Image: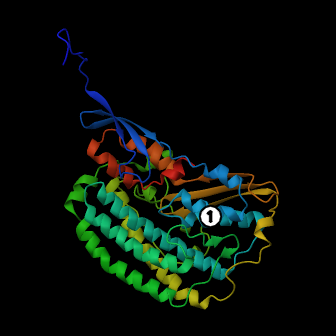
Amino acid sequence: MRPENYKPVKHPPSEEYDLYFGPNHPGIEGNYALKVRLSGDEVQHVRADGGYLHRGFEKLMEERLWIQNIALVPRICVPDPVPMEETYSRAVEILGQIEVPERAQWIRTLCLEMSRVTAHLFYFGGHAATMGMYSNMFWGVSDRDRVLDLFEELTGARVYHMYTTPGGVRRDIPEGFLQRLSETLDYLETRLPEFDDLFFANPVVENRARGAGPMSPEQALEWGVTGPNLRACGLPFDLRRDDPYLVYDQLEFDIPTRSEGDAYARTMVRREELIQSIYILRQVIARLPSVKGPIRAPLPNPLAWNLPHGDAYTRTESSKGELGFFVVSNGGTRPWRVHVRGPSQMHAVQVLEQITVGQRLEDVAQIMFSLDACPPEVDR
């Protein structure tokens, strides 16, 4: 019972209020969150909050042997782990002046494009889920599992493969693997028209995603945007073509772009990239049987492996954008310093805080997911 002299407190009227968006919302995987200030349902201000995600990858790498970090780096970006292994391994190879056999380079390229396919399928389902279209999410995860089955056959693990190591790869391709991969690619190509009907050409998706979270080319360059998010602004930059590594200079592929720079453009660029990855994989499948030789360079005991003094910076075109590793050696058995330049650092903080202002509350989730960020990359 309220006392007889109770008087309710009257607050001054205000049009603005704060909302904690996350950390369990599917807008970005993990416990990432946004502190959003709203006026009605319009976003006025956004502050990114990594929550309790910090995992200290870079310092952990400095406390582990060179070879032990192969088990750690895939966890920096779970949906697309292969570029982490490959980029770190190339940095170690530069420091150790290790020449990777040609066959291993082709196999690494195969794994990178398989990982890009799985990442984009996961993205399609996640973006759809932010608009309440869960059928597309189930389809994307289910079709991704078919490629993960192949990863499990090749590496022994579905997600954290630990397959690319300094000097090459851990094992050769199993008998019949390329045929099974080719059949999986055939299946994915037959699924694209169904994804178009359900998601990409769906009027609901077009109406919701067109104009959501737009970026101009000038803004994208100023903010350091890379990868599909940059190409969705009409800028055709791709490290696989513009600064090639492994065997990408021997492959043919297009660089899909869009000009709108909004959430729909970012989604459609990734759809076209999925087609290009399938095209690249078919070229590798055709070429790989004729590339003979070892799958890794001879190395000393990795548990007592001292690399010379020096530093190396390597970068890879991951599904999220430009991924870079800066590794410094002081001549010991482990890295002296490591810095990871993940594309999500820019996309999930600086960019997201800018492009959500002026948007509606119901579009915040899809704008978050349209940038395709990996929160562990942000809080390393």
Placement of the N terminus among the 4 image quadrants: top left
Residue under the image location 41 percent in, 81 percent down: 185
Look at mark 1 in the image and give the residue it sits on.
Answer: 71
Residue at the extreme left = 4
- Vertical side of 166 occupied by 221: above or below: above
- Vertical side of 302 occupied by 42: above or below: above
Residue 354 spot, x, y in % from top left: 41, 41
Q: How many marks?
A: 1
Residue under the image location 22 percent in, 63 percent down: 202
Residue 252 appears anywhere in the view: no
Who is closer to the viewer here, 146 or 331? 146
Tag 1: amino acid: Ala
Residue 36 spot, x, y in % from top left: 36, 36
Residue 365 spot, x, y in % from top left: 33, 49
Left or right relative to 143: residue 310: right
Residue 355 spot, x, y in % from top left: 38, 43
Circle 1 — which element?
A: helix
* Residue neighbourhood size for the residue with mark 1, other residues' Cα within 10 Å, grouped as few (<14), some (14–19), many (≥20): some
Q: Locate residue 66: give its quadrant.
A: bottom right
Residue at the extreme front = 1
Residue 126 appears anywhere in the view: yes
Left or right relative to 77: residue 214: left
Residue at the extreme top = 5
Left or right relative to 157: residue 19: left
Left or right relative to 71: residue 131: left
Residue under the image location 80 percent in, 72 percent down: 300
Who is closer to the viewer here, 97 or 183? 183
Q: Locate residue 124: give its quadrant.
A: bottom left
Who is closer to the viewer here, 291 or 301? 301
Residue under the image location 76 percent in, 63 percent down: 95
